[in-house]
Image (spheres, coloured by chain):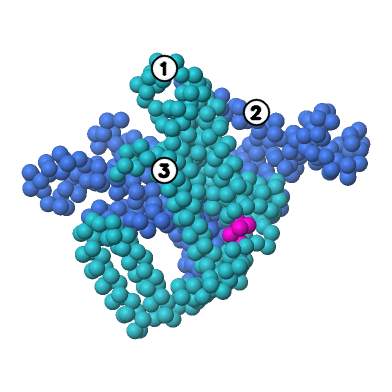
Amino acid sequence: MRSFLAILTVLVTILGFWYVACIPMNIHEAANQAQRAGEQVSPESTRERRGIGRLALTFKNPDLWHSVYAQDRPQLPAPHQVGVELWNTTVGMVQKGRAFSKRSLLLHGWITLSATLLGFVLGTILGIVLAVSIVHSRAMDMSVMPWIIASQTVPILAIAPMIVVVLAAMQVDDLFAKGVISMYLSFFPVVVGMVKGLRSPGKMQLDQMKTWNASRSETFWKLRLPSSAPYLFASLKVGVAASLIGAVVAELSLSQNGGLGARLLAGSYYGQTVQIWSALLAAAALAALLVWAIDMAQKVTLKRMGFSQ
Amino acid sequence: MIWVWGSLAFWLVAWAINTRLSRRNTAWARFFVPTLFGITLLVLWEGMVRGFAINPVLLPAPSAIGKTFASELSVLWGDLVQTFFKGALSGYVIGCTAAVLTAIAVDRSPFLQRGLLPVGNFVAALPIVGMAPIFVMWFGFGWQSKAAIVVVMVFFPMLVNTVQGLQASEAMQRDLMHTYAASYPQRLFKLRLPAAMPFIFNGLKISTTLALIGAIVAEFFGSPIQGMGFRISTEVGKLALDMVWSEIAVAAIVGSAFYGLVAMVEKAVTFWHPSQRG
C-alpha cells in the first residue's frame, strides 16, 4: 500500500511536469493563433517572436497559457490529448464497429504483437538450445559464449533495414523478417539466464544424482532443467521487452504493412505528434501487458513446481 | 563446389582442434578457441557465398566487404565522428551523469525510492527508441537530437542501477560509519558510492550499447548527409550491401571497444569486488 502511494506520487509528478512543459513547448504556435484571432500578443511581430526563446515568450504572455492545450499539431501534446486519441483509435473504433480498420490502433498493435510473439518464441527456443549445448559441451562454451556476448555490443537494431530488405528479396514473409530481428534481441537474455540456471544445482545435488546412478540425460531432465525455471522466467521478461523493441524498429523499415512502428514513422512524416505519442503509449501498454503475462505465468508455474516465493 | 567443400573441411578441422584445446584451461587456449571459431565463421561465409554464387545484393562475401571497408575509410570515419563522438558519446555522458545525480538526490527519501524504482524499471523496458522522431522534430536533424534520444535511453537503466547500488552497503558497514560520526557527504563518498560502483558500472555497460543504438536509429528519421544510420538507410536503398556491412563492422568494432573500455575501467575501480577477483 505504501509503495502504491509512492508510485502514484511519482506518476503524478511526471504528469504535472508534462503539463507544465507543454506551455513553453507550444507557446510559439499559441501566440501565432492568438494573433490571427485578433488578440494582443507581445512582442507583436512574428519575426520578433521567432527570435526569442520559449521561456521568455512564456513569461511575457501569461494569458496564453490556457490555449497551449488545444492545438491540432502541438510540439508537445498534453497527456489528455494523447489519452483522447488513444481512446478514439481503440475503444472508439470498436464502438463504431470498425475495430480492425486501418486507423485503429488495435490493428496496428496486433500486427506488432504477432511479430513480437513470433520473434520471442524463436528467440527463446534458440536461446534454450544454445544454453543446453553450452552447458554440455566445453568446446561450445569456450568458442561460442564469447561471441554471444560480443554479439550484444553490436547495435543490431542498426542492421534492421538491411535484414528486412534482404529477407524481402528472398521472398520471405514480412512477419518472419520482423520476427528475425526480434529473435536476435531476445535470444541473448535467455542464453545467459539458462546457462546460469542449468549450472545452478549445487555440488551436493549433483553428487546425490551420482549416488542414484543417474545418467547424464536423467540429471538434465530431473535436476538441471527444473532448477533452471526461475532463471528462465527472469530472462523471459527481459527477452519479451527486447523482442517488442525489435518488432517496433523493424516496422520502421517495413512500414507498408502497418504496426506501431509504422504509425510512429507516418506520424513523424506528417507532423502528427498526437499520433506519435499515442503509438508510443500503446507500445508501452503492450510491453507492460507482455511482462505482466510472463510474471503471472512465472508465479503459477513456480508455485506448482514447489519453489517457495 | 570446391569452395563449399573446402570451407566445410576447414570447419571440421577447426572444430576438432577446438574440442581438443578446450580440455586445457590455459589463458592461451581461452583466447585461441573463440578466435578460431570466429575465423571459421568467416571462412564458412566466404566459402558458401562463392560456392553457391550468392548474389552480392543479398549477401556480399567478407573479402568484398573488406575491400569496400579499406577503400571507403574516410567516409566511414566521417560517419563515425558524426554518430558516435558527437551524438552517442555526448548523450551518454550527459544521460549517465544526470541519472547518477538524480539517484543521489532521490537516495535521501525512501518514499521516492519506492516509487521511482518500479516506474524506472518499467520505463527501462519500454521501446524508448520510438521517441526518436519526436526528438528529431524538437532538436533538428543535427547531432543534438541524437544526443537527446541517447540521454533519455540511458537515463532509466542507469537510474535504477544507481539507486539499487546506493542501497548495497551493509547495515554493519553503515553502523560503523555511524560510530565514526561520519557526516552525510562522508558516508556518501567513503562508503555508499564505492559500494555502489559494481551496480553503476553494470548500468554504464548496458548503456554503451543503448547509446550506439539510439544514435543510429535516430538517424533513420532525419540526419545531415553523414552518420552511420543515415549511410545504412541510404546504401540499403541503393542495394550497396558491401557498404552497409562495412558500417556494421565499424559499429561492431566501436561498440565492442566502448564496452571493453568501460569494462577495463570497472576492473580498475572495483578491484575489490568478488566478481573481479576471480
| SS class, disc 1 | loop
Give the image location of residue B173, x and y in percent: 37, 23
Check the picture and name the quadrant holding the C terminus of chain A. top left
Q: Nearer the viewer, residue B196 or A208?
A: B196
- Magenta segment main secondary structure: helix
Q: Is residue A116 magenta?
A: no
Q: CA distance from mark 1 to mark 3?
A: 28 Å
Give the image location of residue B106, x and y in percent: 53, 26
Crowdedness near tag 1: few (<14), some (14–19) or many (≥20) residues, C-alpha within 10 Å:
few
Give the image location of residue A72, x and y in percent: 75, 42
Chain letter of the residue beneath label 2 in the structure image: A
Q: Residue at left 53%, top 46%?
A: B127
Task: Give the number of the mark in front: 2 or 1.
Answer: 1
A171 lies left or right of B9: right
Residue position marked by numbered label 1 in the rendering: B180
**Type of the residue with mark 1:** Tyr
Q: Nearer the viewer, residue A284 or B44?
A: B44
Q: CA distance from mark 2 to mark 1?
A: 42 Å
Chain ID for cyan: B
Residue position marked by numbered label 3 in the rendering: B268
Which dot marks residue A16? 2
Q: Residue at left 54%, top 53%?
A: B212
Region rendered in magenta: B79-83
| SS class, disc 3 | helix
Q: Nearer the viewer, residue A106 or B66?
A: B66
- Please, is residue A115 above or below residue B159 in the view? below
